[in-house]
Each structure stands twice: as C-alpha cells, then as structure tokens.
Image (tube, rainbow, N blue to C red):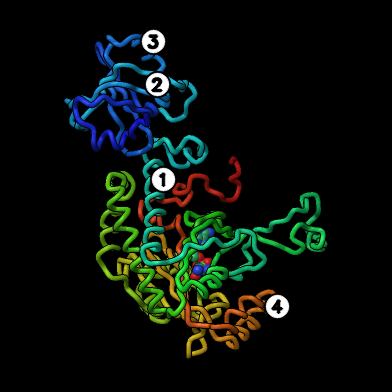
Amino acid sequence: SRPPSIRSILNHGQPGDAVMANGWVRSKRVLKGFAFLDLNDGSSMQGLQVVLDEALPAFAAQLNQLGTGASVTVHGDLVASQGKNQRIELKATSLQVWGTADPQTYPLQKKRHSFEFLRTIAHLRSRTNTLGAVFRVRNACSHAIHQFFQEQGFLWVHTPIITHGDCEGAGEQFSVTALDLHHLPLTAQQSIDWSQDFFGQPTYLTVSGQLEAEIMAMAFTHVYTFGPTFRAENSNTSRHLAEFWMVEPEMAFCNLQGDMDWAESFLKFVFRQVLEQCADDFEFFNQRIDSTVLETAQLIIDQPFERMTYTEAINRLEQCDRSFEFPVAWGIDLQSEHERYLTEDLVKRPVIVTDYPKDIKAFYMRLNEDLKTVAAMDILVPKIGELVGGSQREERLEVLQARMQETNLPGEDYWWYLDLRRYGTVPHAGFGLGFERLVQFMTGMQNIRDVIPFPRTPMSADF
Ligand code: 4AD
Ligand code: MG
C-alpha cells in the first residue's frame, strides 16, 4: 500500500496506529539504550520523530548507517510523544536503510549554511529547511494562481517559447539557432545566411507571452499564460534572472482601471490561499528570514493598494528630503531607490503607479489623451520594487501603426498583431507578474536565486 506523507502522519496519526514512513534523516540523537531520528520527506517543515530501541534487530549496525542524509523506510507504531515539540512519534519495529550519506563528504551537516554556499550545491540544497519551505510556498503559489484564474473563468493558454518578435522591444533576447555559430567571429555572425537555418530567419527565446495572449483574448475574452520567459539582461542583481516564470492574464473589454482591479484582487487571493496552506512555512520565514513577512501578507490581504500617477510619483520624489543617486526628473524610468522610497517610506504598502511617459514604455501601450503618457500600470512593493507590469493595450489601428513607426518596429513582422485591430478590435488590458519576485516577496528571501530550484544567471550552467 502507499505510505502516507509525514505531513499527513503528523496531522492525522493517532497513538496506536501502525504506519510506515519514508524519508531522509535530518539528524540523529543517541541516548542510553535508544536513539531518535528526525525523519523528513519534504512534505512539511516539521519532521517525524522516530524512536529506535536497542532491542531492535541490527540496532547497533544500523545506527552507524543513519547519519544526516541517509534514506530509510521505517515500520512501527505511533505513540504519544513525551517531547514538547511534537504530539506523536513513531516507535520503530523495523527499519530499512536504502542509502547512506558519508558524514565526511556529505555537505549538509546539521548547521547553518550560507545561501551563497547552498547555491553551489543546487542538487542538494532542497533538503534544507529554508529551501524546502521556499519550494513548498512556490508550489502553493502556482496552484493558487491557477485556482484564481480557473475560478474566474479564464482560459490557460500556452504561448510559444521560440518566437520571432521582441515583445518588450528592449533587445534582451537570447537567440535560438540550429546553425553552429560558435566558431564564427561576431562580425561573421552578423552576416549569417538565415535561409540555411532551421527556422529560416532569426529566432529568439520569448521575453513575454503577451502578444500571443492578446490573440487568444480576442477569441476567449479572458485568458492567461503561466510559463518560462527569458531575458539576456542585467541578471547580476538580487531581483533578476535570465530565466524566470511569468503569469500574464489578458482581458478583452477591459480598461486600465479594470486591469488594476484584476491585479489587486488576484494578489489578495494568492496571498490568502498560500498563507492558509503554508502556515508553518510562513511562521518559519517570519522567525528566521524576515520578521515582517506575516505582517506584510496580512497587509496585502486587508488593505487596498495605493494608486498614483507617474507624474504624482515624480512630484513626491522631487519634494521629499531624500537625495537619490539617480536624479529625479519627469521622463526618467523609476530606479529601485525611487521605488523603495515610494513603497517603504512614503506609503508603506504596495503602490500602483500609472500613466508613464510613452518614451520609456513598450509600443503596445495605449496612448493617453495628453499624447505624452500611456495607460501603463506597475505594481511596486516594499523591498522588491516592480512586481507587476501591465497596461491597457492600444486597440486603435492608426495610433498603433504610428507608435510602431516611432519606435522603428517593422509593421510587416507584426501583420498578425495589426490584424487584431482590423477585425473586431476592442479595448483590452493585461499584466505580467514576475513569479519569482512574488515568491521572494512572500517569503522575505533576499536573493531571487534562492526561490527557483535551478537559477539561470550569468555563469550558472551546472545543470
Ligand atoms: O514589466 P515586464 O517587462 O512586462 C512584460 O513583459 C509585459 N509584456 C507583461 C504584460 O503586460 N503581459 O515584465 C513583467 C514582470 C516584471 O514586473 C517583473 O516582476 C518580472 O516580470 N520580471 C523579471 N523577473 C525576474 N527576472 C527578470 N529578469 C525579470 N524581468 C521582468
Ligand atoms: Mg516592467
């Protein structure tokens, strides 16, 4: 029969139950006549305490093999625990050791390791308390995201990873080619004969599924994507990855107000679900990683987000008594020091900044009546900065064409995107949520590399 998870044994097991438990030894304590194992299978922060009595067959021989990291199956009976940390424990009647872990070489001995060190052993770090909690929260978060959109009637659409265009127009794409270019000098690579390549033209890894999501929204009204995206940018910070997951809903018959309302209720829902499902893990983060995460989660759930225009934000930044490294003036892109001031000092909660100058935003954003700003909205949060980027899209064919010319986008490559404005165009809006930034924000983890199992950043290619 299928053995229960340790989480379910801890939650539902009763003294007298005969159970079988699988897991890895986190620690061992040897006392006179018996020993305790802390057994963990990843299902919860807390492990199952296993009691080994010296009367067990092969007790002495097995005890030697049961160091931190060893994998075992234990059969036994649950008994009420005398210890203060657990309600029940498992008194073993037999035990099988599957694999040992030599304490001389196994890197995860029972002590605190730095996150920098753990990144060098990404194949083992998920067995630690912190990374274990992070990846359970990450899982609960993915589930809550799907739950929200599914309950609201959104269709999950799968957008391509290999694309021809550059959605954000920022030139941060990784190219994909079947040609072996490595031996060619850069100058020669620029004169490649693409007709010889698998795709017959330059192709890239997607930076965003938005444009394809817009296509689907023009058929299904409410859709979302949730998948990996890739950016060859600025990845040497604690908030950037070269490969990250993005959630991108797209809503037809929706304006910027509606877009913000969707984003806010979405975030509130996800926090509520994850807080409930991962209560122990949240408790752990609050105690060990960042003592504000519980308070912050409650704030997200209970308080409306602040909303202000970009122009207002610039005014507030200009008027404040802080001196910034990057000078503030209307037209600049907000830097993380500015975002932090707004969310951490000025309003102390998430801020939705709207109506940015068109020159610092992508071509597809809807031009406002002032002809200077676009119907954009970014959600900024304390410590992280930009968590969400979204906008109402330009649905007017001529305005869009003019914007594309202004930004030097070849109209012929986007004929299908323009077609959406030719046939049954409608006001529509959407946003992109950086999934790892959300997990980072929720858990209080300082570095984005510690909230994704295998971070892709410059110089990281062990896996
Ligand atoms: O603001 P961005 O570039 O927006 C878009 O890509 C739009 N097409 C989204 C849409 O409207 N459908 O990216 C969206 C979010 C950012 O707010 C940030 O949270 C995250 O994606 N993000 C990154 N996360 C980790 N590493 C990176 N290099 C990121 N770049 C953006
Ligand atoms: Mg953005």
User: Disc 4 designates what residue?
Assistant: 412
Mark pair 2, 1: CA separation: 24 Å
2 and 1 marks in contact (CB < 8 Å): no
As drawn, 99 above or below 259 = above
**Residue 13: x percent and y percent?**
23, 32
Q: Quadrant of the C terminus?
A: top right
Marking on residue 67: 2
> As drawn, is 261 to the left or to the right of 217?
left
- Mark 1 is on which residue type? Phe
Q: Is residue 120 above or below residue 286?
A: above
Point 80% across, 60% down: residue: 187
Residue located beneath label 3 in the image: 61
Q: Secondary structure at mark 4?
A: helix
**Left or right of 449, for residue 185:** right
Q: Earlier in the sequence, mark 2 or mark 3?
A: 3
* Eye-nearest disc, 4 or 3: 4
Rounded to the nearest angstrom, the CA distance separating label 4 from label 3 is 74 Å
Mark 4–mark 2 Cα distance, whole angstroms, equals: 64 Å
